[in-house]
Image (cartoon, grey):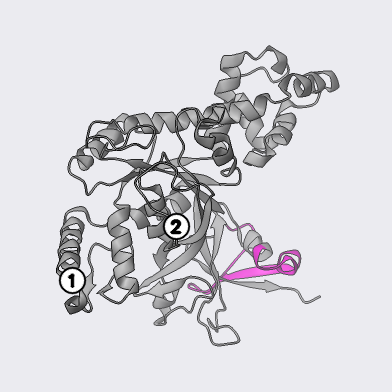
Amino acid sequence: MLIGIVGKPSCGKSTFFKAATLAEVDIANYPFTTIKPNHAVGFVKIPDPAKAFGKTSNPRTGYVLGDWRFVPVDLIDVAGLVPGAHEGQGLGKEFLNDLNQADALIHVIDASGSVNEKGEPVPRGSYDPARDITFLEDELDYWYLDIMKKGWDKFVRQAVQEKRPIAAALEKQLSGLRVSEELARKTIDALGLDKEKPNTWDEDALLALARGLRKASKPIMIAANKVDVEGAWDNYERLTKQFPEYHIVPCSAELELALREAAKHGFVNYIPGEGSFTFAHAEQLTEQQQAAMSFIKGFLERRGSTGVQAVLNHAVFELLRYKPIFPGGVGKLEDSEGNVIPDCFLMPADATALDFAYRLHTDFGKNFVKAVNVKTKMPVGKDHVLEPGSIIEIMAAKR
């Protein structure tokens, strides 16, 4: 799973990325600070499953804070996109191609309206962030269309002559964007296009097809950033009404980054996604730092959280509909080294016990006998769709 962080220059995208990962990235308030894509690991937040047994997990990857377990996910931060990116503006085609393998996109926008479409500073509130939402949609749609139309006449002619499904040809053409034959077929059917005569599809039909494929293969959510700035919260509330088809999360990447850095250096105790923190060594903070932390505390009291963790969780669990599943044993939650529930696998929403067995090891899947829900101690069949957060023991026949 790979999640892309996208947006125009200077919207706070790289700040969001650093807040989510604590990776070392360049941050500056001018266009194209980021040129090459940054890869790093962020974390989704779930209840620690070991707590139900009076224990604490020892994750092999990720970590535990309090009652929460943080599970790693891969993130990529690409350079800022500007209008005309699909035509090469601002090195846009190169940056768009960096998103090929992304399963979903988090679109970071400047909700304060203090940066124009090119990423240049403007008076606060003078730019409408709604323009950024529609601009990114258009750029992505035309990017898909441009790729789809490369050699279009040739592969359509071959499909018609050989009576091959046009959906299969689209899968081959758009495989780099994770478009499958099934997805192409469903999109064509949903649009009511004549799949027997793709050579009759006009430009409007092709653009509609590109848009449908993009929505299905690159789902988007919106991170309304900089909501700590005066006037930005009003913009956020307006955007939720203007774009009801999107899930829009208000956030302040700058405040989240400050909290995580303070926690990293031992100044505060903070669990990402929480609505409060406590001071550990307040006496070591300068007056300026204390004033900043007081501002953050007031923001959290008003808004509940900085929103960054909520964005990551929504992208994984709602947008992509993944669920955490843990391997374990009814009689023993520890591995051979004594680590409690060390592993967590993020599985698709419809994953069954058999799917999980194959995820653990091919031999477990091939020789599957049954699975047992560790919490209930009840057996489940191979076709049983697993509940999020399940701890599952897989039993397989010996070869």
Up/down of 195 relative to 116, above or below: above
Q: Which residue is mark 1?
A: 286
Specify the label residue 104 is tagged with: none
Query: Residue 53 falls in which quadrant of the image?
Result: bottom left
* Residue beneath the point at 70% across and 18% down: 198
Counting from the top left corner in percent of width and height, residue 262 is at 29, 69
**Of all residues shown, which one is farthest toward the right?**
162
Q: Neighbour class for label 2 at 10 Å: few (<14), some, many (≥20)?
A: some
Q: Which residue is mark 2?
A: 25
**Of all residues shown, which one is farthest toward the bottom?**
337
Look at the image and say whether residue 365 sits in the magenta stretch: yes
Which stretch is magenta? 359-384
Counting from the top left corner in percent of width and height, residue 395 is at 67, 73
Query: Residue 181 falls in which quadrant of the image?
Result: top right
Counting from the top left corner in percent of width and height, residue 32 is at 45, 43
Taking the image as shown, residue 55 lies to the left or right of residue 326, namely: left
397 and 118: which one is in front?
A: 118
242 and 132: which one is in front?
A: 132
Q: Quadrant of the C terminus?
A: bottom right
Taking the image as shown, residue 315 lies to the left or right of residue 262, namely: right
* Residue beneath the point at 25% across and 33% down: 238
Taking the image as shown, residue 171 lies to the left or right of residue 42, namely: right
Q: Mark yes or no: residue 372 visible.
A: yes
Look at the image and say whether residue 360 sits in the magenta stretch: yes
**Mark 2 and mark 1 in contact (Cβ < 8 Å)?**
no
Q: Mark yes or no: residue 74 visible.
A: no
User: In the rendered structure, which amino acid carries the disc numbered 2?
Assistant: Val
Marks 1 and 2, Cα distance to the nearest angstrom?
Answer: 25 Å
Up/down of 73 relative to 62, above or below: above
